Amino acid sequence: MVSNDETPAAVSAAPASFNAREYQIALFKAALQCNTIVVLDTGAGKTFIATMLIQHFAATGAAVPMPPPTAGLPLPERRLSVFLVNLVPLVVQQSRAIQTQSGLRVNAFCGDMGADNWNASHWDHYCQRSDVFVMTAQVFLDALRHAFLRLDQFHLLVFDECHHARKAHPYNRIMVEFYKREPPATRPRIFGLTASPLCLKASIE
């Protein structure tokens, strides 16, 4: 991953030129309307569809209208996207792909980078300097549990390999502990990616 002086896991550069296929455009448009799970074979461009969504929300603002403040907490001036992965190596892989395809400010985090030991000030620092977070689901869950991050700071949550969202997996805990308890007006859009429809069926059941 490309690094700069500000963070050991930040990438920022001009976007590359990519042509979306017809099915990718159709899935992108569907995801603009509601929470969506995309089931496509490996190599079919699932991450590219997610990047199209990330670019759209970065350019147009929140996925849902910005609500008035509640519970005495100020709402963020801008909202981010977060791309969640199941394994540490995917943090590097997916952050590179999103940066290359979008040119947005992408910051990547995992426990190996020390994110497990951060406090609210660290997260605030990166929120002000990012358009997209890419991180392991466990790091995101821990930050939510410590109230270092809040769901209303994000307009899009992407779950890579979302068929893992079962039982005690961090994907499932994020949805149960935080998404379902978040007021509908401030819930981020959900976009799930998987190449394993049979596993996904078991997860839903």
Image: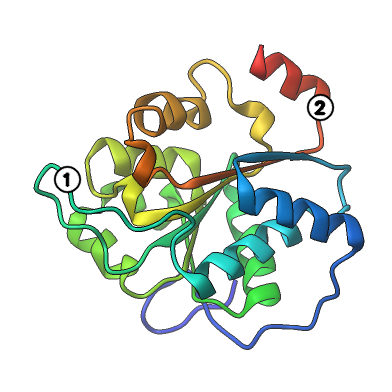
x, y (%) of residue 34?
A: 60, 43
**Quadrant of the image containing the C terminus:** top right
x, y (%) of residue 125?
A: 26, 69
Q: Nearer the viewer, residue 54 or 173?
A: 54
Q: Nearer the viewer, residue 189 or 13?
A: 189
User: What is the CA distance from the residue labelled 1 to the residue labelled 2?
Assistant: 38 Å
Q: Neighbour class for label 1 at 10 Å: few (<14), some, many (≥20)? A: few
Task: Please state which amino acid type lies under the numbered disc 1.
Answer: Thr
> Dot 1: what SS?
loop
Task: Give residue 14's quadrant in the image.
Answer: bottom right
Which residue does the image show at 14% across and 50% down from the upper left? Answer: 73
Which label number is shown at residue 70? 1
Which residue does the image show at 88% across and 55% down from the upper left? Answer: 23
Is any part of residue 114 visible from this angle?
A: no
- Which of the two discs, 1 and 2, sits closer to the camera? 1
Is any part of residue 77 visible from this angle?
A: yes
Pointer 2 residue: 197
Task: Give residue 102's quadrant in the image.
Answer: bottom right
Farthest residue toward the top? 205
x, y (%) of residue 120?
A: 20, 55
Left or right? Give the position of 179 relative to 144.
right
